[in-house]
Image (tube, rainbow, N blue to C red):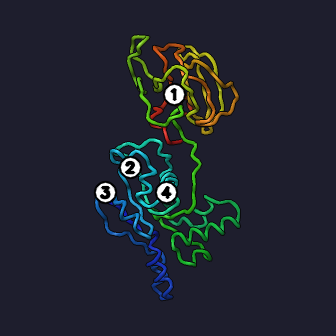
């Protein structure tokens, strides 16, 4: 659905007014929620940025929108808030890409099942009874929930949105394995291709990224080195295993600067330098991502994601 969904967070004002009345209808309306009528087909940053109420929408990235930080500012929120809400670091943005945007600082949490309680949600973000109680008070104030939410079990319905203030996600996502995160030139993409040396069609399990001889290479994601040395057509290669069981491969290196067993950090630990070792037609990095079963996946689709 492309139409903008403008939501007053949990319809708190209307709900609180009815509950405060003390009337018999209060019980029936305790779960009352309101969705405002559909707005225009495209989200309007100015509307969200000027509103003090919690509003959210779906944004479709347009040509020229190159950095998510500027987009967040236009909606009246923060880079960290959009990253947490979408569980995406947004290293790459492209026209047509869609994301959930909102106008407050914090993660906009979507309730996935009926009768999920406030306590259960708070427990996902904090550990310890005292910490949870303090955080619960922040969530209640941020969403203008009725005071009864602090005293009794408070349930949400599937599809409700709850603002979780102050949430920051420490992303362990894939990056391009160089200092610059600008989209690099790719001479050979993932997929079936005609091999320039072997002169036949075969599967290309990664990306070939041309770079000057000696360009520093960094881990695309933090992990532990499981292989560092010569490996047939790859030439000099480094293989890194990550916490989720996936691995990355960096081939045709001119120099290797790590050894098996080393812990390496994304974008910080230099693991080698670009070269043309193995079956290669010139200096470039062969970069692969493999799932926990060893199957090669398209590295481009993993950038900015876990």
Residue 42's label in the rendered image is 3
Query: What is the x, y in percent for residue 52?
Result: 44, 70
State the SS at label 4. Answer: loop
* Measured Cα–Cα span from mark 3 to mark 4: 20 Å
Residue in the picture at 49% in, 37% down: 181
Please tell me how crowded label 1 is: few (under 14), some (14-19), or many (20+) other residues with Cα within 10 Å.
Answer: many
Disc 2 or 3, which lies upstream in sequence? 3
Percent across and percent down for residue 195 are: 41, 15
Which residue is pictured at 49% across the width and 60% down the height?
108
Q: What is the CA distance from the residue labelled 2 to the residue labelled 4?
A: 17 Å
Judging by the rendered image, the residue that carries numbered circle 1 is 288
**Tag 2: Cα neighbours inside 10 Å, few (<14), some, or many (≥20)?**
some
Q: Earlier in the sequence, mark 2 or mark 4?
A: 4
Q: Say the numbered circle drawn on residue 78.
A: 4
Q: Is residue 251 visible?
A: no
Q: Is residue 88 left or right of residue 245?
A: left
**Closer to us: mark 3 or mark 4?**
4
Give coordinates of residue 154: x percent, y percent. Answer: 56, 72
Above or below 139: residue 300: above
Say which residue label 2 marks. Answer: 98
Residue depth check, mark 2 versus mark 4: number of the one nearer the observer: 4
Left or right of 169, for residue 192:
left
Earlier sequence position, callout 1 versus callout 3: 3
**Which quarter of the image is occupied by the N terminus?**
bottom left
Closer to the observer: label 1 or label 3?
3
Viewer-nearest of discs 1 and 4: 4
Q: CA distance from mark 2 to mark 3?
A: 11 Å
Provide residue 88's location: percent of width, then percent of height: 49, 47
**Residue at 62% across / 32% down in the picture?**
241
- SS for tag 1? strand
């Amino acid at each position: 659905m492309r139409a903008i969904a403008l939501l007053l967070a949990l319809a708190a004002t209307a709900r609180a007014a009815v509950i405060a009345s003390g009337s018999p209808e209060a019980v029936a309306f305790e779960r009352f929620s309101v969705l405002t009528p559909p707005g225009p087909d495209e989200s309007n940053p100015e509307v969200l940025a000027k509103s003090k109420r919690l509003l959210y929408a779906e944004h479709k990235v347009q040509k020229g929108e190159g950095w998510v930080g500027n987009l967040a500012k236009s909606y009246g929120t923060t880079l960290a808030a959009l990253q947490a809400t979408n569980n995406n670091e947004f290293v790459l943005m492209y026209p047509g890409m869609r994301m959930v945007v909102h106008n407050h600082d914090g993660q906009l949490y979507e309730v996935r099942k009926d009768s999920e309680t406030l306590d259960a949600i708070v427990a996902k973000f904090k550990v310890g009874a005292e910490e949870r109680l303090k955080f619960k008070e922040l969530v209640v104030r941020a969403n203008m929930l009725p005071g009864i939410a602090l005293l009794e079990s408070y349930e949400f319905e599937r599809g409700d949105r709850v603002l979780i203030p102050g949430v920051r996600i420490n992303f362990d996502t894939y990056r391009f394995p160089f200092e610059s995160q600008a989209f690099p030139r790719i001479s050979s993409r993932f997929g079936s291709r005609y091999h320039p040396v072997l002169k036949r069609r075969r599967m290309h399990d990664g990306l070939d990224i041309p770079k000057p001889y000696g360009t520093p290479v960094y881990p695309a994601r933090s992990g532990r080195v499981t292989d560092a040395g010569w490996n047939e057509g790859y030439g000099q290669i480094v293989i890194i295993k990550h916490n989720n069981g996936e691995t990355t491969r960096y081939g045709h290196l001119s120099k290797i600067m790590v050894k098996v067993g080393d812990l390496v950090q994304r974008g910080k630990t230099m693991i080698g330098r670009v070269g043309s070792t193995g079956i290669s037609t010139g200096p470039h990095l062969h970069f692969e991502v493999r799932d926990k079963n060893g199957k090669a996946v398209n590295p481009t689709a993993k950038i900015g994601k876990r």
